[in-house]
Image: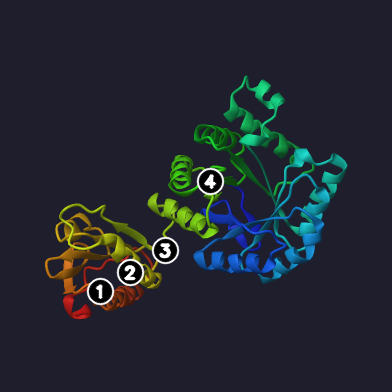
Amino acid sequence: MTTNIVSIGGLTIGGQAPIRVESMLKFPLSDYDMCLRQCNLLQESGCELLRVAFPENSLYRSLCRLNKESNIPIMADIHFDPELAILAMEAGCPSIRINPGNMPPNKLEGVIRKAQESGTVIRIGANSGSINTRQLQKTNGDRGKALAFAVEEQLTILQRYGFEQIILSAKSTNIAETVQANMYLVQKYSTFPIHIGITEAGPGARGLVRSAAGLSLLLAQGIGNTLRVSLTADSLLEVEAGYEILRSLGLREKGVHLISCPTCGRKRIDVASIVEKIKPLLTQVPNGITVAVMGCEVNGPREAKSADIGVAGSPRGMILFTQGRIVGECTIEDLPIKLVALIEEIKKEKKLKGEGKHSCLSVSREDIF
């Protein structure tokens, strides 16, 4: 999907830029230490854009400080109050999220003028809870269309002032409504970057499945320039899930692609415990590498033949393999040491070959054992 490019604190969104993964602070700005701690953890996890609630002007100094100390660009989330929008920009926020329809026209003009002067990007949008009776009547009760029209009305207001540094967003708890609304917006306003998500997706597996289902339907059609997996959970899980969705669809290769078998009566190891055992080691693995953990020697090199690095249970302990070829054996206790050695060989070979998907075919037993 070809779109205009907007830049938020140096982060490009739209055009040929990668699909960005964002999240939101789960703490109020009044608890600044926790906000900064979460911000730093999110930056380490790969979060690229961070939305922050800014509900009152007493939090102005905290927002100023966060903009200075955060390594992630900040998007201030504003509701109703145009003065807060202007304060957020004065605090250094490179982007704000507002609903122009909820602001008095005479005050909104000041917000737009300030955004034009400061180069601030404005995200507008609607969710299923903000659809009004008039919009539903206009669409004969079609909530997907009503959601799109709600966004369209906001866009029209900004365009009247000649403002174009805009990101669009239409999100619902209902997947079908979300997909329908975004398809309409893309067909009619293809030049604007779009933020996607399933709002109020919920907790645990429910939220993850609902988000993955909805986002995948959109991403598979080329819709979406930024995304958030909105969970009733830690923001770190939102970022992890966002990258996993993109990785699974082949849209980004940030981080490791970790696969493991579901286990059966053939298993020779506790796959779940091995996965947890090696997870800390995988931070050393280059982007785009597939790592497999399999329960037995049958599922190991054969079923996980495409894995760049693989471990599997065997009658004598563990085997290690690369792209279906066994390169060594070890005990479960020695696995971390042997796996680190294999990872180092992979990194050396990847460096020698330059950028691109790694092939492990030249790694031999002598390299590792």
Q: Circle 4 is placed at which residue position?
A: 224
User: From mark 4 to mark 1, how far is it between C-alphas?
Assistant: 40 Å
Q: What residue type is labelled 1?
A: Leu
Q: What residue type is labelled 3?
A: Gly
- The mark nearer the N terminus, 2 or 1, is 2
Name the mark nearer the viewer: 3 or 1. 1
Where residue 112 appears, x then y in whole percent? Answer: 79, 49
Where residue 227 appears, x then y in whole percent? Answer: 54, 50
Q: Residue 277 carries which label?
A: 2
Where residue 330 appears, x then y in whole percent? Answer: 18, 75
Name the mark nearer the viewer: 2 or 4. 2
Q: Are marks 2 and 1 in contact (CB under 8 Å)?
A: yes
Q: Kindly identify the residue that appears in the image at 44 percent across and 56 percent down.
A: 252
- The mark nearer the N terminus, 3 or 1, is 3
Q: Kindly identify the residue that appears in the image at 61 percent across and 49 percent down.
A: 4
- The mark nearer the N terminus, 2 or 4, is 4
When the figure is inspected, residue 83 is found, relative to residue 173, above or below; the finding is below
Q: Which mark is residue 256?
A: none
User: From mark 2 to mark 3, how far is it between C-alphas?
Assistant: 18 Å
Q: In this view, does 234 lie to the left or right of 316?
A: right
The picture quadrant where one finds residue 142 is: top right
User: From mark 3 to mark 4, how far is it between C-alphas?
Assistant: 20 Å
Q: Circle 1 is placed at which residue position?
A: 335
Q: Are marks 2 and 3 in contact (CB under 8 Å)?
A: no
The picture quadrant where one finds residue 260 is: bottom left
Name the mark nearer the viewer: 4 or 1. 1
Q: Can residue 90 be seen in this view?
A: no
